[in-house]
Image (spheres, rainbow, N blue to C red):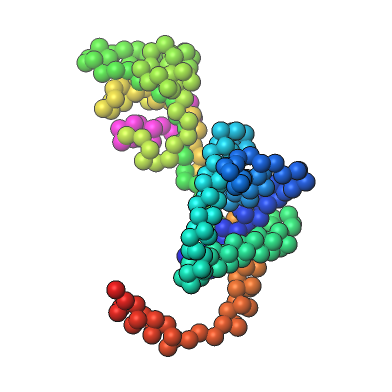
Amino acid sequence: MNAISHFGRTWGLGLAFMVLGAFGAQAQEVVAKAGVASVTTLDLKAELARIPEANRRAMLANPNALTTIANNLLVRRLLAQEAVRDGLDKDPLNQAQLQISRDRALSDMRLATMDLQNNPSPAALDAYALEQYRVNQARYERPAQTRASHILLEDKGTDSLAQAKVLVEKLRAGASFAELAKEHSTDPGSAARGGDLGFFAAGAMVRPFEDGVNALEKPGDISEPVKSQFGWHIIRLDERRPKSIAPFEEVKDKLVADARTALLNQSRQAKVANIQKEIEGNLNAIEAFIEASKKAP
């Protein structure tokens, strides 16, 4: 994972700090203990800040889940105390790993603070989202769609076709399509809706059905019985919707969310770029490290 993609996760951490910030004024109480070791509500707050918001909200409503988290934290705390007792924190490699863990936690906190400071205004988000919508119209194309209704009869031979033709005659004479669909259709899903199949794009239906729909010219037209592997269909064309672009308001929420991420990434990238200008690498040392690693047991 590169630095920028890693930074992309810290916006959620920043939000977690805000969501959980209200707990800061509360007195810290012990929620689990073993001997002299304990876990407090502050420890719970810190651990919850690491968890995605959807899961975090669920856990805040579940005492059993919070108890499990507290117990796990206490087990780790006790194991850490044993590690210190055994002098593991004095080993140079372990010290380096501890320092890296500390750096990672503190850098995430710093980036979360930056995110909150650089949080774009609603106007900036709307402007960026609208610009992205305008320059990426192809992403928001909606294919041509058709809305149709049908009555499906199970294929039981010539009697089924004869029944279908009778229903077609009734429909063309003015009978209610919805009522006949509810009474006769063997497609339970659409029958309950009066035969309505909703909107669908080309290729969504089996070929005989699609050919039958395409042969109808105007809304309200009723097809002759059409046979497919499912039986006999009587199809009514309800509406044709041409190819179009989804309106901005329909996709705005997703675009604004993407805009927030993009604008915050710009701030993070600028910060990383400034830091990287100060870095002085030592390729010779890295190559020597590689060679030494090859010889290590």
Q: Is residue 49 above or below residue 164?
A: below
Q: Residue at x 66, y 55 (%)?
A: 14
Q: Tell me which corner region of the image, top left, top right, bottom left or bottom right, holds residue 217.
A: top left
Residue 63, position in %: x, y?
60, 33
Instruction: Determine the residue positioned at 60% across, 47% down.
Output: 37
Left or right relative to 213: residue 45: right
User: Where is residue 33 drawn, in percent x and y?
Assistant: 60, 41
User: Residue 172: x, y in percent?
Assistant: 43, 17
The image shows a total of numbered marks equal to 0
Q: Vertical placement of 212 versus 105: above or below?
A: above
Give the farthest residue toward the bottom.
284
* Location of residue 115 (image quadrant): bottom right
The image quarter containing residue 106 is bottom right
The answer to whether residue 109 is visible is: yes
Does the stretch in magenta take in 210?
A: yes
Q: Nearer the viewer, residue 158 or 193?
A: 193
Residue farthest left in this picture: 157
At 21% from the left and 16% from the top, the residue drawn is 157
Can you say whether 187 is above or below 284 in the image? above
The x and y percentages for residue 170 are 41, 13
Task: Look at the image and say whether residue 87 sits in the magenta stretch.
Answer: no
Q: Residue at x 73, y 54 (%)?
A: 122
Per the rendered image, the range of residues in magenta is 207-222
Q: Is residue 133 visible?
A: no
Residue placed most toward the observer, 119 or 25: 25
| Quarter in which the C terminus is drawn | bottom left
